[in-house]
Image (spheres, rainbow, N blue to C red):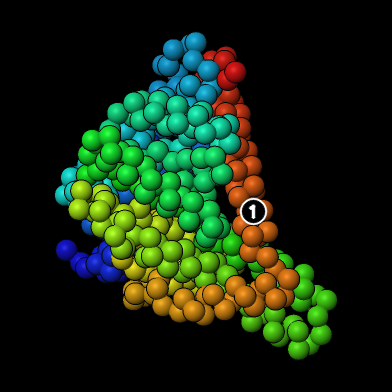
């Protein structure tokens, strides 16, 4: 077997998960081949991904046409999504077992309608777990104050870590087994640069030549710096006496998962958000194009905990220029939640169109 760049990434301690899912890859053998040959050890899904999968081609037509007439569009979405996730879980089951439950997960996300409802999120997560009925399904919940994907702020990540550690301690106190509890905290990367760069551009437009140069030098750096500070927080909390007491009982660390790692600005290196965040106990969920690009020319070196002091200094410099990372990350969280809701609504609308094309009258989701 060729030892590819993705294998080298895995050897450096970073797990590669595919940020994509559709029925075709599950049945034509392409996903199975990637698992076998490309060190692919997990997969993520969300409403946006399913929206694209359902809108393209006819892979879901037979199942939708044969589904019971009384199912709403929301229930039909769950039917096809849970089938896809279940099939993917089965393909990753060998990875899950050989890694001791560290990898081999496939995610499914709670409805964005409960993003700010803690109890509703818990109930939805339990229901989805039972619906998929696989040990290696991972339930994604939005990282809002009440309820852990869609993280942008380091302070929010601190609360997520505390919730995870506290949950493990509660489970242990109740006599529960920690060995099969797994969690990742999805920290979004490229969107941070998109927002910070836009704010820098606004300042540059009003600056003199010296100011333009100073501000321009700050572009494209905030996202990686923000993630490095998050990893430093991970290292701090998953070491020491509190963590050791849990680790000796079989607990797994809650790994940082780098999401949104495709490069949005064509002026930046297309694999920069992979190369600059490589290190132990991390996951990078990459869309197909980023995987292809990294296989072609990605460089592997431990970078995730290098230059942390520089990252802190950058944040101070941005603050001195009037760019508040709190304001940036708060805005990104609200936009992210709205985007997932919009994708969910668009997905249901697309399903209605698909059903009509199949000669079925859609039943609206209540």
Q: Is residue 263 above or below residue 119?
A: below
Q: Please name the residue shown 28% across and 69% down the image.
A: 12
Residue that label 1 marks: 330
Q: Please name the residue shown 56% across and 44% down the image.
A: 145
Rendering coords of residue 239 (x, y %)? 31, 63
Q: Is residue 248 above or below residue 232?
A: above
Quadrant including the N terminus: bottom left
Q: Is residue 237 visible?
A: yes
Q: Please name the residue shown 83% across and 76% down the image.
A: 206
Task: Judge left or right: residue 166 versus residue 362.
Answer: left
Quadrant including the C terminus: top right
Q: Is residue 88 visible?
A: no
Q: Residues within 10 Å of mark 1 (few under 14, many from 20)?
A: some
Q: Please name the residue shown 61% across and 57% down the image.
A: 329
Quarter residue 134 falls in? top left
Task: Judge left or right: residue 362 versus residue 104.
Answer: right
Dot 1: element? helix
Rendering coords of residue 169 (x, y %)? 32, 44
Is 288 in front, or is 235?
A: 235
Q: How many marks?
A: 1
Q: Is residue 359 above or below residue 98?
A: above
Rendering coords of residue 59 (x, y %)? 41, 32
Quarter residue 236 falls in? bottom left
Rendering coords of residue 126 (x, y %)? 39, 28
Task: Judge left or right: residue 74 versus residue 133.
Answer: right
């Amino acid at each position: 077997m060729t030892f590819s760049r993705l294998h080298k990434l895995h050897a450096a301690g970073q797990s590669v998960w595919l940020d994509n899912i559709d029925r075709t890859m599950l049945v034509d053998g392409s996903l199975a081949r990637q698992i076998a040959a490309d060190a692919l050890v997990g997969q993520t899904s969300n409403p946006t991904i399913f929206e694209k999968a359902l809108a393209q081609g006819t892979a879901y037509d037979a199942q939708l046409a044969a589904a019971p007439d009384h199912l709403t569009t929301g229930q039909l979405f769950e039917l096809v999504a849970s089938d896809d996730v279940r099939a993917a879980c089965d393909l990753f089951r060998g990875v899950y077992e050989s890694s001791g439950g560290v990898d081999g997960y496939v995610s499914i996300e709670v409805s964005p309608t409960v993003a700010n409802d803690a109890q509703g999120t818990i109930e939805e997560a339990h229901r989805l777990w039972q619906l998929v009925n696989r040990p290696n399904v991972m339930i994604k919940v939005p990282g809002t104050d009440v309820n852990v994907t869609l993280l942008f702020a380091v302070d929010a990540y601190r609360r997520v870590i505390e919730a995870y550690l506290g949950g493990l301690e509660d489970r242990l106190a109740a006599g529960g087994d920690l060995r099969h509890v797994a969690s990742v905290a999805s920290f979004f990367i490229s969107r941070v640069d998109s927002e910070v760069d836009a704010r820098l551009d606004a300042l540059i437009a009003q600056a003199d030549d010296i100011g333009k140069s100073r501000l321009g030098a700050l572009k494209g750096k905030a996202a990686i710096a923000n993630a490095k500070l998050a990893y430093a927080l991970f290292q701090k909390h998953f070491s020491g006496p509190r963590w050791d007491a849990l680790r000796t009982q079989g607990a797994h660390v809650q790994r940082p998962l780098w999401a949104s790692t495709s490069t949005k600005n064509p002026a930046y290196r297309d694999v920069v958000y992979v190369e600059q965040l490589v290190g132990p106990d991390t996951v990078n969920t990459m869309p197909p194009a980023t995987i292809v690009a990294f296989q072609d020319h990605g460089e592997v070196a431990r970078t995730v905990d290098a230059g942390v002091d520089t990252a802190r200094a950058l944040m101070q410099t941005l603050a001195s220029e009037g760019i508040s990372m709190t304001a940036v990350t708060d805005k990104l969280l609200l936009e992210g939640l709205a985007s997932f809701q919009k994708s969910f609504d668009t997905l249901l609308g697309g399903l209605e169109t698909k059903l009509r094309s199949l000669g079925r009258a859609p039943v609206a989701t209540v």
